[in-house]
Amino acid sequence: MSLELRNVGRVFNGIPAVTDVSFSAKPGEIIGLLGTSGCGKSTLLRAISGLDNEYDGEISINGKTSKMIHRETGFIFQEPRLFPWLTVLGNVTFGLTGEKQEKEQLGKQYLEKVGLSGNEKLYPKQLSGGMAQRVAIARALVTSPEILLLDEPFSALDAFTKMQLQDLLLSIWKAYQTTIVLVTHDIDEATYLCDRIIILRGQPGEITKEIKLEEKRPRARGSKQLAEIKTEILKSLDLNKAVDLTTV
Ligand SMILES: Nc1ncnc2c1ncn2[C@@H]1O[C@H](COP(=O)(O)OP(=O)(O)OP(=O)(O)O)[C@@H](O)[C@H]1O
């Protein structure tokens, strides 16, 4: 599904958090929202999902503009936000309606897709951070969202688990051609995953740059091409200069 934001802004208690943001995503595109802390990335995701509808401007999904909850979207947060009293399978099937047996069958299918078959009966406290985030991914996917919104989904994980889950996200994207909006602080993650990176800066946050990545997937982590794009991003954030330690 396509997504379009036109002049979106959000003011909290008279203070603008983010202003005049316009961008669009074609069906199946992976868009990165990258920017320094507090520039309004999460605010934009909440507006896209419809969890927050007090924004200015317009947001359309497949050409339809609405400020209602967008049921076509699935949300994955930084923390898994699982219900501790439900099993892994119970967490995945929680939002589903219909026959128990059908729900469980569907839940198991998605647990298999995220590599968690056989863990259905475990409780959240028995899971590692990476396993818990896999459950959160399965829970978001089980409703077949056409647009996935991810808010720093891997930032709480160790470097190796993070890379595994980035690859899992790409395999899901390849299978379903989901449109993805990924909020991240991690430039390497953005260059590895995204078709386009939108850079936001300031308070209120504004778009300062948009970078299109032409590299075919799978991309090589640490390749010269991705390193060049990283340098371009650092420059646009004024973070490319070496610190003069003599003046510190
Ligand atoms: N519900 C709220 N009420 C008041 N102010 C808010 C609310 N939500 C966000 N803000 C403010 O809006 C600004 C943008 O916040 P937001 O969480 O969207 O930024 P962010 O770019 O996602 O930050 P981070 O990268 O640190 O998560 C911040 O100044 C924040 O304090």
Image: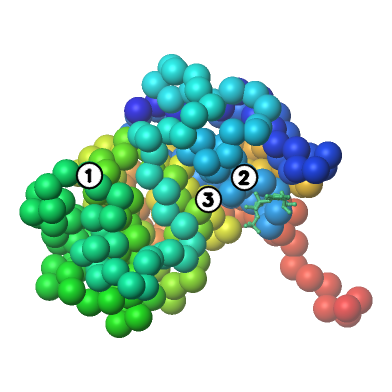
Q: Is residue 227 above or below residue 65?
A: below
Residue projecting furthest to the top: 63
Query: Dot 2 surroundings within 10 Å: few (below 14), some, or many (20 or more)?
Result: some
Residue projecting furthest to the right: 247
- C-alpha separation, residue under disc 2 versus residue under disc 3: 10 Å
Which structural element holds mark 2? helix
Q: Quadrant of the N terminus?
A: top left
Q: Amino acid at mark 2?
A: Thr
- Whether label 2 lies within 8 Å of ligand 1 gets the answer yes
- C-alpha separation, residue under disc 3 versus residue under disc 1: 29 Å
Q: Which residue in the protein does label 1 denote?
A: 97
- Whether label 3 lies within 8 Å of ligand 1 gets the answer yes
Q: Which residue in the protein does label 3 denote?
A: 183
Q: Earlier in the sequence, mark 2 or mark 3?
A: 2
Q: Is residue 50 above or below residue 26?
A: below
Q: Is residue 114 visible?
A: yes
**Could you say where residue 202 lies in the image, as x and y percent from the top left?**
77, 46
Question: Which is closer to the viewer, label 2 or label 3?
Answer: 2
Splitting the image into 4 quarters, where does residue 194 fall? top left
Q: Is residue 247 above or below residue 166?
A: below
CB under 8 Å between discs 1 and 2: no
**Could you say where residue 124 lies in the image, as x and y percent from the top left?**
33, 75
Q: Quadrant of the C terminus?
A: bottom right
CB under 8 Å between discs 3 and 1: no
Q: Which residue in the protein does label 2 denote?
A: 43
Q: Is residue 210 left or right of residue 218?
A: right
**Could you say where residue 185 lies in the image, as x and y percent from the top left?**
58, 58
Q: Is residue 152 left or right of residue 88?
A: right
Q: Residue at x 52, y 50 (%)?
A: 183
Q: Amino acid at mark 3?
A: Val
Q: Is residue 208 above or below residue 59?
A: below
Q: Amino acid at mark 1?
A: Thr
